[in-house]
Image (tube, rainbow, N blue to C red):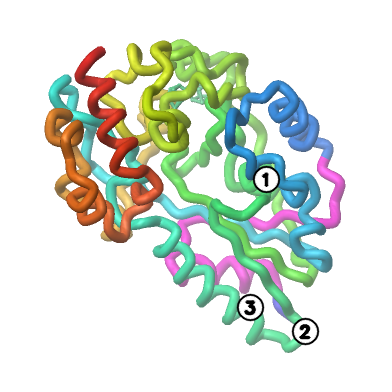
Amino acid sequence: MLTSSQVKQKALELGFHKVGIADAKKDYQDGAQVNLEKWLSLGYHANLAWMENEHRRNIRQYMPDVASVIVLAINYYTEHQHCQDPNFGKISRYGWGADYHKIIRNKLKQFSLWLEAQDQNIKTRFCVDTSPLQEKAWAQRAGLGWIAKNSNLITREYGSWVFLSEVLINISLTGDLPVNNHCGTCTRCIDSCPTSAIVEPYVIDSSKCIAYHTIENREDQLPSTISAKLEQWVAGCDICQDVCPWNQRFAKVTDIDGFNPYPENLSPRLSDLATISDEQWQKQTQGSALRRIKATMIRRNARANLKS
Ligand code: SF4
Ligand code: SF4
């Protein structure tokens, strides 16, 4: 019979940096559901319609016979730093290198095949980022870290520079203990957000967030309240993670080469991005998670920075 420790050992062998297990049948009284409903009812998801997906409310709608949730984390921090020269744009660390979906999906596939090969009755379903799961809540339940005041999941070993993914499985494995919150009295992320998007601890209003607007807003122009405060960000925003003492103390350089920045992503000149052609942007974002940002959007984001 497959044990939790065998599962965890295999995950680590495949290159995941952290792994934990949560009990999918347990009714965790951690407020995750209430918080999601409140966030949606206040419209803080802006036009992120997929956040309303019913599956996010009940994991069994996603996989009816799920018994355990194996949560995995991959550290993506590299030693490179953002350029502070105002002539250059800033791209969030998650988008610097190769598309994390592809890197993680390869590992998840191998992991799932291995799990299913252990017993013919074992069934799995894996997810990375795009699936309708409350993945940060599951990560906290599985003991990987805690949902912090900036709404990221913080791990003790790597800070919040981790990508999360999950394997849902139809057998009961011994679960881990949920992690307590260690933000304490700190409010650095809230105080540092240039657009006051962290409207209260743990609550982000997407319509005020630079990351949301630079990546998800498809309008021709950014709202003036955002464009005036971009602080060089053209794709995402890492401010509330950069200032976090857990990241400053515990970030570790990843061993996954693919997360090293494409040279043109580290400090792109704003004037170049403001006029970049569709073809050049396509070329520059090949195999990158930045593909989600259309050429029209990156030009808009760069121009907004140049005007502010
Ligand atoms: S990502 Fe940037 S804009 Fe959004 S909450 Fe964090 S600091 Fe504020
Ligand atoms: S900056 Fe402080 S409050 Fe914000 S996430 Fe980090 S520890 Fe928590």
- SS for dot 1: loop
Residue drawn at x 85%, y 56% as measured from the top left: 25
Q: Which residue is mark 1?
A: 134
Ligand 1, seen in the image, is in the quarter at: top left
Above or below 142: residue 208: above
Q: Is residue 276 left or right of residue 93?
A: left
User: Mark 1 CB in 8 Å range of ligand 2?
Assistant: no
First along the sequence among labels 3 and 2: 3
**Distance in Å between CA atoms under marks 2 and 1:** 26 Å
Confirm whether the magenta stretch covers residue 8.
yes
Q: Which residue is mark 3?
A: 115
How many callouts does the rendering have?
Answer: 3
Which residues fall within the magenta stretch?
3-28
Q: Which residue is mark 2?
A: 121
- SS for dot 3: helix
Q: Is residue 34 left or right of residue 125?
A: right
Residue 255 locus on image (x, y percent): 31, 58
Query: Can see residue 255?
Result: no
Q: Quadrant of residue 242?
A: top left
Residue 126 locus on image (x, y percent): 61, 65
Residue drawn at x 58%, y 15% as measured from the top left: 199
**Distance in Å between CA atoms under marks 3 and 2:** 10 Å
Mark 3 or 1, closer to the camera? 1
Residue drawn at x 31%, y 60% as measured from the top left: 287
Q: Quadrant of the C terminus?
A: top left
The residue type indicated by label 2 comes to Asn
Above or below 184: residue 297: below
Residue drawn at x 61%, y 34% as measured from the top left: 147
